[in-house]
Amino acid sequence: MKRDAGFLAALVVLFALRLLAGALLPLSSDEAYYWLWSRHLAAGYFDHPPAIAFVIRAGTLIFGDTLFGVRAGAIALSFATSWFVWRLGATLGRDEKVGALACLFFNLTLMVSVEMLAATPDAPSIATSAAFCWALAKLAESNDGRWWIAAGIAAGLGLLSKYSAFFLGAGAVLWLVASPPMRHWLKSPWTYLGAAVALVLFAPNLWW
């Protein structure tokens, strides 16, 4: 019980520090660049898909064109990502303490501390990647094809965040091919329905 309380206390401190840093640290040049995007919403931009512009716009609509407003969406995504990592760890480890430890270590890593604070495409990309992996873990645990829909939503939003999300999809295909217990999904309509959902979500950027 004390250990669980310690995990939660550490996470609360980390989240509080992230909120404080988001309100005080000056914007990087990349963040200012993406903030300009958010003032001119579109289905795509010269060097990235559009998710980060919409994330920033959501934050500034609530908190104004302030340091915290620009970063609010990314910080909110860090909370969601932490939940996905917790659930992923608990699912794979079959233990809530494993999930809590995974979440804590995730938030302690230097890269996550920076990328889930800054308003850059990495914030939605990391969030959607965590959601995608969690959905596949739940698929393997439950053998319920409906989890492909969740994976497809995460994949589509991931592609709207960074084009590198294609590699997650390729990894999932490799997993299905290389894992005998999972190969039956290659013949399931659920798998292709999930892929179709991802394509539909990504279609506006493709059209752009």
Image: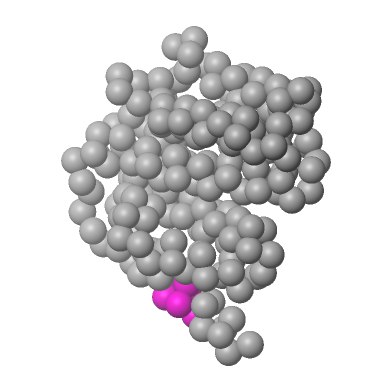
Q: Position of residue 189 (x, y in %)?
A: 78, 23
Q: Between residue 51 and residue 93, name the one nearer to us.
A: 93
Region of the chain picked out in magenta, as a range: 9-13
- Placement of 152 over or under 24, stated as above or below: above
Query: In the figure, is residue 148 to the left or right of 204?
Result: right
User: For residue 188, what is the image quadrant?
Assistant: top right
Q: Is residue 164 a member of the stretch shown in magenta?
A: no
Q: Between residue 84 and residue 204, name the one nearer to us.
A: 84
Q: Position of residue 199 (x, y in %)?
A: 59, 20
Residue 62 visible at all: no
At a point 63% along the width and 87% down the height, the residue shown is: 1
- Of all residues, the one furthest to the bottom in this rendering is 2
Task: Give the main secondary structure of the magenta stretch.
Answer: helix
At a point 32% along the width and 55% down the height, the residue shown is: 111
* Quarter in which the C terminus is drawn: top left
- Placement of 67 over or under 38, stated as above or below: below
At a point 41% along the width and 27% down the height, the residue shown is: 163
Q: Is residue 10 a member of the stretch shown in magenta?
A: yes
Q: Between residue 187 and residue 205, name the one nearer to us.
A: 187
- Placement of 146 over or under 112, stated as above or below: above
User: For residue 4, what is the image quadrant?
Assistant: bottom right
- Of all residues, the one furthest to the top in this rendering is 207
